[in-house]
Image: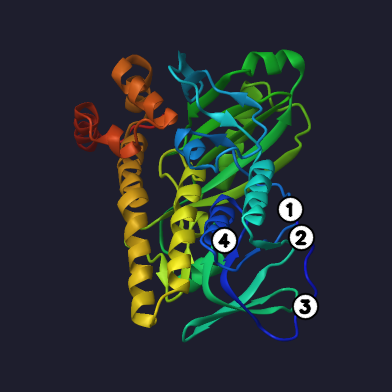
C-alpha cells in the first residue's frame, strides 16, 4: 500500500474519493479508475487489516471478482452439514462445490492492489472525519488533517459508516455476529476439510457456522441484536460441542450486520453508498461479500458518470439511476431473502426439514451457492411459495 501522505495545506480536487477499502470500496475505486477518473481510496486501518467475516465466497462473489485476482483459497466446501440446534444433523454433497474459503484481510488487500494497479491512489491509516457538499464539489476532511475535494464520493466504510449517516441509510434488520478464528490440530483439520457446518440456533433467526481453512476454522454465531448474553452463551456452547472451545483463538471478535430498509436512500447529491455502508446484506444468511462486490461495481460506474455530468440536474438523474440499478438487482434479492428470513424465524424446523429431506430444496440451495440461481429464484418456486403461506398460518416455533 502507499504510505499515508503528509497533511495537505490546500485542497486537492479528485474526480472520485472512495471511503473504505473493503470489497465494495476497492471495487468502486478500481472501476472508477478504469473509467479514467482520478481516484483516491481512503482506508482508516493499515492494510492488510483483520476483518470479522466468515470468509466464504459463494458463486456470485467469485463471478464478481476481477479476472486473475491473486487470492489464497484455503479450502473449498464439498459437503454441507446442517443441524437443528445440535440435533437432526445431516450432511449433503454439493453438485458443484463453489464456496471458496479465504481470509478477508487477504481478499481486501488483493482487491485494493487491483484498484491501485488500475490507477487509483491508496491511502491507508486515513479515516474520514467530515464531508460536506457545495455545488458540484464534495469536501472531505480526514483524521490526518487533509482537506480534499472531489466531484463525487463513494462511501463504503462498513456497517458503522459515517457516509451512511450522512446519506440517511435506514435499516430493517440489525444483527450481532460473534466469531472466532480457531487454530486446530491435524485430526480436527482433517475432520472439517472440505466440509462446512450450518446449525440453526436456539434464538429467533439465529445460526452457527464452521468454515474450514486448513489449520484454522472460522466459527461463529449470529442472531438479532438485543440479547448479547444469550448469544454469547450460544457461542460458547456451539464451540464446545464442535471441539473448538479449547484452543486459544487467533481472533475472537464481534460485529453488527445491518440489512437495508426497502426504499432507504443510496445517494445524497454526489455522495453514493455501497456494500455494508448501504446495508446491502442478505437477511437470512447475512452474506454480504457478493452484495459488496456487485454494488461496488455499480457505484464505480455511477461515480464516473457523475464526474462528467453536465449540470446538477444530470447529476441528480445519475444518482437516482444508481439507486434504481441497485434495487433492480440487489433490492430484489434482499426482498426475497427477507421473506425467507421470516419463514426461517417462524419455523426453523420446517426450513431444516426442507433442505435436508426434500432433494429439490437442496438442489435449489446448491444452485444458489454455485451462482446458478438467486434467492429470488429460490423463493419463486412452487414449494417455497407454499411453505411460506403455510408458515404464516402456523404458530412460531423455536429451533
User: Quick check: marks 3 and 1 in contact, CB under 8 Å?
Assistant: no
Name the disc covering residue 33, or none: 4
Residue at horizontal 68 percent and vertical 50 percent from the top = 113
Image x and y of residue 249, in percent: 75, 34
Of label 4 and label 1, which has the lower sequence position?
Answer: 4
Name the disc covering residue 2, or none: 2
Which of labels 3 and 4 is toward the front?
Answer: 4
Depth check: 329 or 282 in front? 329
Name the disc covering residue 341, or none: none
Label 2: few (<14), some or many (≥20) within 10 Å? few
Image x and y of residue 34, in percent: 54, 57
Which of labels 2 and 4 is toward the front?
Answer: 4
Vertical arrangement, residue 129 with respect to residue 83, above or below: below
Which of labels 2 and 3 is toward the front?
Answer: 2
Determine the secondary structure under disc 2.
loop
The residue tagged 3 is: 7
Determine the secondary structure under disc 4.
helix
Determine the secondary structure under disc 3.
loop
Image x and y of residue 263, in percent: 32, 62
Depth check: 281 or 34 in front? 34
The residue tagged 1 is: 47
Amino acid at each position: 500500500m502507499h504510505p499515508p501522505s503528509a497533511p495537505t495545506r490546500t485542497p486537492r480536487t479528485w474526480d472520485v474519493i472512495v471511503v473504505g477499502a473493503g470489497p465494495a470500496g476497492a471495487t468502486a475505486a478500481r472501476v472508477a479508475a478504469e473509467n479514467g477518473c482520478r481516484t483516491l481510496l481512503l482506508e482508516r486501518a493499515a492494510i492488510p487489516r483483520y476483518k470479522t467475516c466468515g470468509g466464504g465466497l459463494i458463486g456470485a462473489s467469485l463471478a464478481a471478482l476481477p479476472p486473475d485476482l491473486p487470492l489464497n483459497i484455503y479450502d473449498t466446501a464439498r459437503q454441507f452439514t446442517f443441524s437443528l440446534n445440535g440435533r437432526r444433523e445431516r450432511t449433503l454433497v454439493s453438485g458443484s462445490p463453489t464456496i471458496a474459503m479465504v481470509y478477508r484481510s487477504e481478499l481486501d488487500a488483493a482487491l485494493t492492489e487491483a484498484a491501485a494497479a488500475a490507477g487509483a491512489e491508496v491511502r491507508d491509516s486515513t479515516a474520514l472525519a467530515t464531508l460536506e457538499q457545495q455545488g458540484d464539489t464534495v469536501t472531505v476532511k480526514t483524521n490526518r488533517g487533509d482537506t480534499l475535494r472531489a466531484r463525487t464520493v463513494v462511501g463504503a466504510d462498513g456497517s458503522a459508516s459515517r457516509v451512511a449517516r450522512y446519506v440517511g441509510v435506514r435499516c430493517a434488520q440489525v444483527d450481532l455476529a460473534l466469531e472466532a478464528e480457531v487454530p486446530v490440530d491435524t485430526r480436527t483439520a482433517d475432520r472439517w476439510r472440505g466440509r462446512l457446518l450450518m446449525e440453526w440456533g436456539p434464538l429467533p433467526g439465529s445460526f452457527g457456522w464452521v468454515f474450514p481453512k486448513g489449520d484454522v476454522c472460522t466459527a461463529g454465531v449470529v442472531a438479532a441484536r438485543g440479547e448479547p448474553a444469550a448469544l454469547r452463551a450460544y457461542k460458547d456452547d456451539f464451540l464446545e460441542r464442535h471441539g473448538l472451545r479449547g484452543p486459544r483463538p487467533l481472533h475472537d471478535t464481534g460485529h453488527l450486520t445491518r440489512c437495508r430498509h426497502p426504499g432507504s436512500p443510496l445517494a445524497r447529491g454526489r455522495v453514493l453508498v455501497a456494500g455494508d455502508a448501504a446495508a446491502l446484506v442478505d437477511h437470512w444468511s447475512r452474506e454480504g461479500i457478493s452484495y459488496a462486490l456487485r454494488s461496488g461495481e455499480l457505484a464505480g460506474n455511477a461515480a464516473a458518470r457523475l464526474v462528467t455530468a453536465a449540470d446538477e440536474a444530470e447529476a441528480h438523474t445519475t444518482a437516482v439511476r444508481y439507486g434504481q440499478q441497485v434495487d433492480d438487482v440487489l433490492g430484489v434479492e434482499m426482498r426475497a431473502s427477507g421473506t425467507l428470513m421470516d419463514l426461517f424465524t417462524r419455523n426453523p424446523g420446517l426450513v431444516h426439514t426442507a433442505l435436508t429431506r426434500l432433494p429439490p430444496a437442496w438442489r435449489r440451495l446448491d444452485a444458489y451457492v454455485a451462482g446458478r440461481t438467486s434467492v429470488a429464484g429460490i423463493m419463486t418456486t412452487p414449494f417455497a411459495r407454499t411453505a411460506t403461506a403455510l408458515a404464516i398460518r402456523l404458530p412460531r416455533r423455536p429451533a
